[in-house]
Image (cartoon, helix red, strand yellow):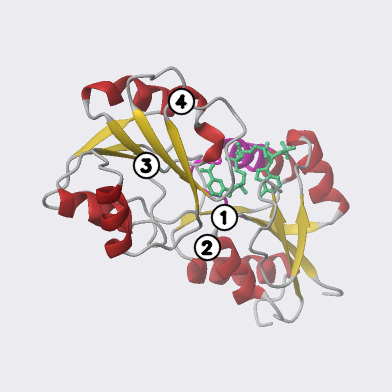
Amino acid sequence: MTGQQVVLILGGTSDARDLAGRLDGRPGLRAVSSLAGRTREPVLPVGESRVGGFGGIPGLTTWLRDHRVAAVVDATHPFAARISANAVAACAGTGIPLLRLQRPGWTPREGDDWREAASAEEAARLLPSVGRRVFLTTGRMETAPYAGLDDLWFLLRSVEPPEDAVPANLEVLLARGPFTVADEIALMRRHAVDVVVTKDSGGTQTAAKLDAARELGLPVVMITRPAVGAGPRVESAAEAADWVVATVRRQAGDPAR
Ligand code: NAP
């Protein structure tokens, strides 16, 4: 093999940054992390990165071809459904191997009171029958479904301020995790929260709110994950790094390298 094999990491998650760190400096391999560019001050991965959308399936396909990409790891957030679907289509069209890296979802424990919702819209429909003072932790991009719930009060916690329609009775708390259970309990008590809304993001960074809700006996409206495409899938950055190394070796036709 001559030159370096390019691996595209579709990122924006801590797992993606972990993977970029594991691949950085590997001989014969050039990992490029891709970020959507949503946050003004993103936590950048080590190594090479690019920012911004590709322009749908055609744009991603062109990018993969132009950069002679040998393998793609889709390490985007479990709820970033569009880019994941685009990756499936572009990789199928170009014959480039694709791996989905997705951390496991959360599972309820003894004492949890979770109400599942398939979407933010369904969560909004459920809420009035569950509580009155809502801790909304689903991000600034998805506030519109809750606008119009004028009888409820919302504490929205997000990294950056919301830009979309918001509920009338809203307080915004700008913060980036991880958070501790003690701080989450104190926050929920201070605001007399009686229901928590979250996506099933999984992982440890933002799980403290679930422990806090259990301790306080509060219900949680849990928005379930969109379906994932078929194809290889792993749950950790370590497994993804092993897949990349094996796949790139196979592509280079040199199993001993
Ligand atoms: P999305 O709805 O699946 O994607 C919308 C569009 O944004 C895509 O069609 C693509 O534009 C662009 N895009 C998304 N991720 C990209 C990436 N890693 N690199 C380049 N372009 C990307 O995704 P989203 O929910 O807006 O999430 C955007 C990013 O934020 C993702 O990278 C995700 O990992 C991260 N994130 C999302 C959430 C969440 O709850 N959704 C939470 C934390 C972090 P083009 O079609 O033009 O290529």
The residue carrying mark 1 is 75
Snapshot quadrant of residue 94: top right
Residue 135 as seen in the image, left or right of residue 130: right
Quarter occupied by the N terminus? bottom right
Snapshot quadrant of residue 240: bottom right
Seen at 57% across and 50% down, the residue is 76
Q: For the residue with label 4, is its CB less than 8 Å from the closest atom of ligand 1? A: no
Tell me which label, 1 or 4, sits earlier in the chain.
1
The CA distance from mark 2 to mark 1 is 7 Å
- The nearer-to-camera label among 2 and 4 is 4
Element under disc 2:
helix
The picture places residue 252, in percent across and down from the top left corner, at 74, 69
Which mark identifies residue 198?
A: 3
- The nearer-to-camera label among 4 and 3 is 4
The picture places residue 230, in percent across and down from the top left corner, at 49, 41
- Near mark 1 (Cα within 10 A), the count class, few <14, some 14-19 or many ≥20, is many
Q: Which residues are magenta?
A: 74-89
The CA distance from mark 4 to mark 3 is 16 Å
The CA distance from mark 3 to mark 2 is 19 Å
> Is label 4 in contact with label 3 (beta carbons under 8 Å)?
no
131, above or below 245, in the image: above
Which mark identifies residue 50?
A: none
